[in-house]
Image: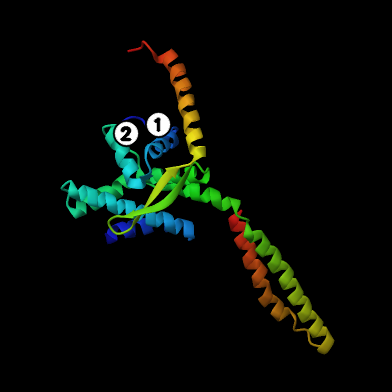
Amino acid sequence: MKKINDHVEELFKDVSYSEETEAIKLEITQNLEEKVWDLMEQGKSEEDAINKAIVDFGDIGDLKQELGNKKTDKKDLTKLNLGFSIWGSLLIICLFIFINFYYTPHTIWFVYPTFCVLWWPLSMYFYWLRKN
Amino acid sequence: MIRSDIIRGHLDSIILKLIFEQDQYGYEISKQISERTNDRFQIKEATLYAVFQRLEKKELIESYLGSISHGGKRKYYRITTLGKAFLREAAEEWKETKEIIDLFMEGLD
């Protein structure tokens, strides 16, 4: 029955992990196995039975949509992440500028850590862009 | 096989009716649909689980874990009071629809 398991995993590979999807996967696997047993009792070989069960199962586009609908109810966190990263990096950069000019006003070095910190909001920005 | 988009619009009612008659689990429903229609209509199991999700979200059915079969516990579904009300309305609506379509399609063959 490993083939059934693998097939279900394959179907759900781009569905994000949650307790709910795990439960559905379990339910589907269970029902598919039952179908295989049933077909075998009707005289099919295990291989044939598994193949027939998998072919009959079809495509889970509808199901993904049902699961997806729920996801849109959830808050869009990417915007929040982006805002947080912008404010956070601003604060950190300000701190560097302050330390720079307070202790070593003749060497300007705060740009270097600034470039480092800027990766944070930049990555969050692209993440947010992709979601929209 | 019959063109299925008309039936698909009523899958929710069909499945709800089967659960109304008796608590059901996934495979049993798909089997019953094939049996009762003499294989003239077969439901793709993938669609079936989408319908379960939808009905459960609307609180027309609820699930519970039942007896152990090969390898695991079956997940059964039973109809709720809301589901029964929905089913009655769906049956009423279908009667209307059928009458209307019949008005135009009768006497053609």
Question: In terms of depth relative to the viewer, which is nearer, A14 or A36?
Answer: A36
Instruction: Relative to B20, say whether A132 is above or below.
Output: below
Secondary structure under badge 2? loop
Q: Which residue is mark 2?
A: B41
Query: Is residue B24 positioned above or below A105 on the image?
Result: above
Residue A131, position in %: x, y? 59, 56
Amino acid bearing label 2: Phe
Question: Looking at numbered disc 1 in the image, what kind of residue is underneath it?
Answer: Ile
The residue depicted at 40 percent of the width and 31 percent of the height is B7
- Identify the disc placed on residue A4: none
- Residue identifier under label 1: B7
Q: Secondary structure at mark 1?
A: helix
Q: Nearer the viewer, residue A18 or B24?
A: B24
Q: Are marks 2 and 1 in contact (CB under 8 Å)?
A: yes
Residue at the spot x=33%, y=56% of the render?
Answer: A7
Where is residue A15 shown, x and y percent of the image?
Answer: 46, 56
